[in-house]
């Protein structure tokens, strides 16, 4: 049986970059939700 070909360093770097970009998008979405909730709470207190 042959060993599967190891991934090149560049392939691993690209995979990590893609994973980080996906994480960054998720974090940004969470931050936007938190900010909008804080704004709603501030508006409720102002009334």
Image (cartoon, rainbow, N blue to C red):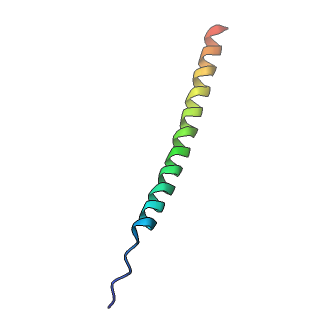
Residue drawn at the location 55% of the way across and 39% of the way down: 28
Residue drawn at the location 34% of the way across and 89% of the way down: 2
The C terminus sits in image quarter: top right
Q: Is residue 40 above or below residue 23?
A: above
- The residue sitting at the top extreme is 47
The N terminus sits in image quarter: bottom left
Q: Name the spot of residue 7 as percent of width and height, x first.
A: 40, 72
Q: Name the spot of residue 16 as percent of width and height, x first.
A: 44, 57
- The residue sitting at the right extreme is 47
User: 45 or 14, which is in the foreground?
Assistant: 14
Q: Name the spot of residue 18 as percent of width and height, x first.
A: 51, 56
Picture quadrant of residue 37: top right
- The residue sitting at the bottom extreme is 1
Picture quadrant of residue 25: top right
Q: Is residue 23 above or below residue 14?
A: above
Q: Name the spot of residue 12 as percent of width and height, x first.
A: 42, 64
What number of labels is visible?
Answer: 0
Residue drawn at the location 55% of the way across and 29% of the way down: 34
Picture quadrant of residue 11: bottom left
Q: Is residue 42 above or below residue 4?
A: above
| 36 relative position to 15: left or right | right
């Amino acid at each position: 049986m042959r060993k599967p070909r190891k991934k090149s360093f560049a392939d691993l770097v690209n995979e990590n970059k893609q994973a980080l970009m996906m994480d960054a998008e998720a974090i940004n979405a969470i931050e936007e939700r938190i900010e909008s909730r804080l704004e709603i709470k501030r508006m409720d207190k102002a009334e």
